Protein backbone atom coordinates (compact mmCIF):
# COMPACT_ATOMS: atom_id res chain seq x y z
CA UNK A 1 0.00 0.00 0.00
CA UNK A 2 1.28 3.44 -0.90
CA UNK A 3 1.89 5.65 2.17
CA UNK A 4 0.78 8.79 0.31
CA UNK A 5 -2.69 7.46 -0.45
CA UNK A 6 -5.48 8.25 1.97
CA UNK A 7 -8.06 5.62 2.75
CA UNK A 8 -11.76 6.36 2.20
CA UNK A 9 -12.32 5.68 5.91
CA UNK A 10 -9.98 8.52 6.85
CA UNK A 11 -11.68 10.90 4.40
CA UNK A 12 -15.10 10.08 5.88
CA UNK A 13 -13.80 10.40 9.44
CA UNK A 14 -12.26 13.78 8.61
CA UNK A 15 -15.50 14.96 6.97
CA UNK A 16 -17.51 13.91 10.04
CA UNK A 17 -15.06 15.75 12.27
CA UNK A 18 -15.41 18.93 10.18
CA UNK A 19 -19.20 18.74 10.29
CA UNK A 20 -19.15 18.21 14.08
CA UNK A 21 -16.74 21.12 14.53
CA UNK A 22 -19.08 23.32 12.47
CA UNK A 23 -22.01 22.52 14.72
CA UNK A 24 -19.98 22.99 17.88
CA UNK A 25 -18.72 26.53 17.29
CA UNK A 26 -19.27 29.19 19.92
CA UNK A 27 -20.15 31.89 17.39
CA UNK A 28 -23.64 33.20 17.97
CA UNK A 29 -25.90 33.93 15.03
CA UNK A 30 -27.91 37.10 14.89
CA UNK A 31 -31.45 36.91 16.18
CA UNK A 32 -34.44 37.08 13.91
CA UNK A 33 -36.92 39.97 14.19
CA UNK A 34 -39.58 37.46 15.29
CA UNK A 35 -37.44 36.19 18.15
CA UNK A 36 -36.77 39.75 19.38
CA UNK A 37 -40.48 40.63 19.09
CA UNK A 38 -41.50 37.47 20.95
CA UNK A 39 -39.10 37.99 23.86
CA UNK A 40 -39.23 41.74 24.33
CA UNK A 41 -42.97 41.86 25.05
CA UNK A 42 -42.69 39.32 27.86
CA UNK A 43 -42.49 41.13 31.20
CA UNK A 44 -40.56 44.26 32.06
CA UNK A 45 -36.92 44.99 31.38
CA UNK A 46 -34.23 47.09 32.98
CA UNK A 47 -31.11 48.64 31.54
CA UNK A 48 -28.43 46.67 33.36
CA UNK A 49 -25.53 48.19 31.43
CA UNK A 50 -25.27 51.26 29.21
CA UNK A 51 -22.22 52.71 27.50
CA UNK A 52 -22.86 55.81 25.39
CA UNK A 53 -19.93 57.62 23.72
CA UNK A 54 -17.49 55.50 25.77
CA UNK A 55 -19.09 56.62 29.06
CA UNK A 56 -20.71 54.23 31.52
CA UNK A 57 -24.15 55.79 32.03
CA UNK A 58 -25.84 52.77 33.60
CA UNK A 59 -26.60 54.60 36.86
CA UNK A 60 -28.68 57.21 35.02
CA UNK A 61 -31.22 54.54 34.05
CA UNK A 62 -30.99 52.38 37.20
CA UNK A 63 -34.40 53.43 38.60
CA UNK A 64 -36.37 52.79 35.40
CA UNK A 65 -38.28 49.77 34.11
CA UNK A 66 -39.07 49.35 30.42
CA UNK A 67 -42.29 47.72 29.26
CA UNK A 68 -42.56 46.89 25.55
CA UNK A 69 -46.12 46.22 24.37
CA UNK A 70 -47.09 43.97 21.45
CA UNK A 71 -48.62 47.05 19.79
CA UNK A 72 -45.19 48.71 19.55
CA UNK A 73 -45.41 51.08 22.52
CA UNK A 74 -42.79 51.55 25.22
CA UNK A 75 -43.68 52.68 28.72
CA UNK A 76 -40.71 53.63 30.88
CA UNK A 77 -41.61 53.77 34.57
CA UNK A 78 -39.40 55.33 37.22
CA UNK A 79 -38.92 58.82 38.65
CA UNK A 80 -41.07 59.95 35.73
CA UNK A 81 -43.13 58.00 33.23
CA UNK A 82 -41.82 58.26 29.70
CA UNK A 83 -43.49 56.89 26.59
CA UNK A 84 -42.37 55.98 23.13
CA UNK A 85 -42.43 53.31 20.48
CA UNK A 86 -40.39 50.37 19.29
CA UNK A 87 -40.19 48.18 16.20
CA UNK A 88 -37.83 45.71 14.62
CA UNK A 89 -36.27 45.96 11.20
CA UNK A 90 -37.26 43.40 8.59
CA UNK A 91 -33.74 42.05 8.09
CA UNK A 92 -32.44 39.27 10.30
CA UNK A 93 -28.77 39.59 9.57
CA UNK A 94 -28.55 41.69 11.66
CA UNK A 95 -31.88 42.43 13.32
CA UNK A 96 -32.40 45.99 14.48
CA UNK A 97 -34.46 47.24 17.39
CA UNK A 98 -35.71 50.73 16.62
CA UNK A 99 -36.35 52.74 19.80
CA UNK A 100 -38.02 56.15 19.86
CA UNK A 101 -38.66 57.68 23.28
CA UNK A 102 -39.87 61.11 24.34
CA UNK A 103 -36.91 63.34 23.46
CA UNK A 104 -35.99 64.31 27.01
CA UNK A 105 -32.53 63.96 28.50
CA UNK A 106 -31.34 61.24 29.15
CA UNK A 107 -33.79 59.20 27.07
CA UNK A 108 -32.85 60.93 23.82
CA UNK A 109 -29.56 58.94 23.94
CA UNK A 110 -31.56 55.73 23.56
CA UNK A 111 -33.33 56.84 20.37
CA UNK A 112 -31.68 54.84 17.60
CA UNK A 113 -31.81 51.78 15.38
CA UNK A 114 -29.86 49.37 17.63
CA UNK A 115 -28.29 46.20 16.27
CA UNK A 116 -29.38 43.18 18.33
CA UNK A 117 -26.25 41.11 18.89
CA UNK A 118 -27.70 38.69 21.47
CA UNK A 119 -31.28 37.83 22.32
CA UNK A 120 -32.53 35.43 24.95
CA UNK A 121 -35.64 35.38 27.13
CA UNK A 122 -33.67 37.03 29.93
CA UNK A 123 -31.15 39.31 28.19
CA UNK A 124 -30.54 41.32 25.04
CA UNK A 125 -27.41 43.11 23.93
CA UNK A 126 -27.84 46.08 21.62
CA UNK A 127 -25.07 47.91 19.78
CA UNK A 128 -24.86 51.15 17.85
CA UNK A 129 -21.73 51.73 15.80
CA UNK A 130 -20.85 55.40 15.62
CA UNK A 131 -17.95 57.28 14.11
CA UNK A 132 -15.86 57.30 17.28
CA UNK A 133 -17.40 54.67 19.57
CA UNK A 134 -19.64 51.64 19.85
CA UNK A 135 -22.58 52.32 22.15
CA UNK A 136 -23.79 49.24 24.02
CA UNK A 137 -27.00 48.60 25.93
CA UNK A 138 -27.66 45.41 27.85
CA UNK A 139 -31.24 44.94 28.90
CA UNK A 140 -32.28 42.20 31.29
CA UNK A 141 -35.63 40.93 32.41
CA UNK A 142 -36.83 42.20 35.80
Image (tube, rainbow, N blue to C red):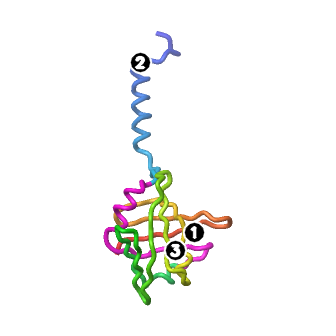
Q: How many labels does the image show?
A: 3
Point out which mark residue 113 bears.
none
- Which of the marked residues, 2 or 3, is nearer the chain's N terminus? 2
Residue 107's spot in the image, x, y percent? Answer: 52, 80
Q: Residues within 10 Å of mark 1 (few under 14, many from 20)?
A: many
Identify the residue at horizontal 62%, vertical 72% (top origin).
54
List the single residue furthest toward the bottom: 79
Which residue in the protein does label 1 denote?
A: 135
- Magenta range is 31-57
Which residue in the protein does label 2 denote?
A: 8
Judge by depth and name the residue closer to the eye, 4 or 32: 32
Identify the residue at horizontal 56%, vertical 84% (top origin).
105
Q: Which quadrant holds the C terminus?
A: bottom left
Residue 80's spot in the image, x, y percent? Answer: 44, 89
Q: How far apart are marks 1 and 2 (CA)?
A: 51 Å
Assess whether mark 3 and mark 2 are in contact (beta carbons under 8 angstroms).
no
Amino acid sequence: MNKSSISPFRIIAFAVLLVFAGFNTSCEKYSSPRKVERHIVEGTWRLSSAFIDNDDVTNIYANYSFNFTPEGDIVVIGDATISGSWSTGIEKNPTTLNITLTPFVPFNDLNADWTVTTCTKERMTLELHGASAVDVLIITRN
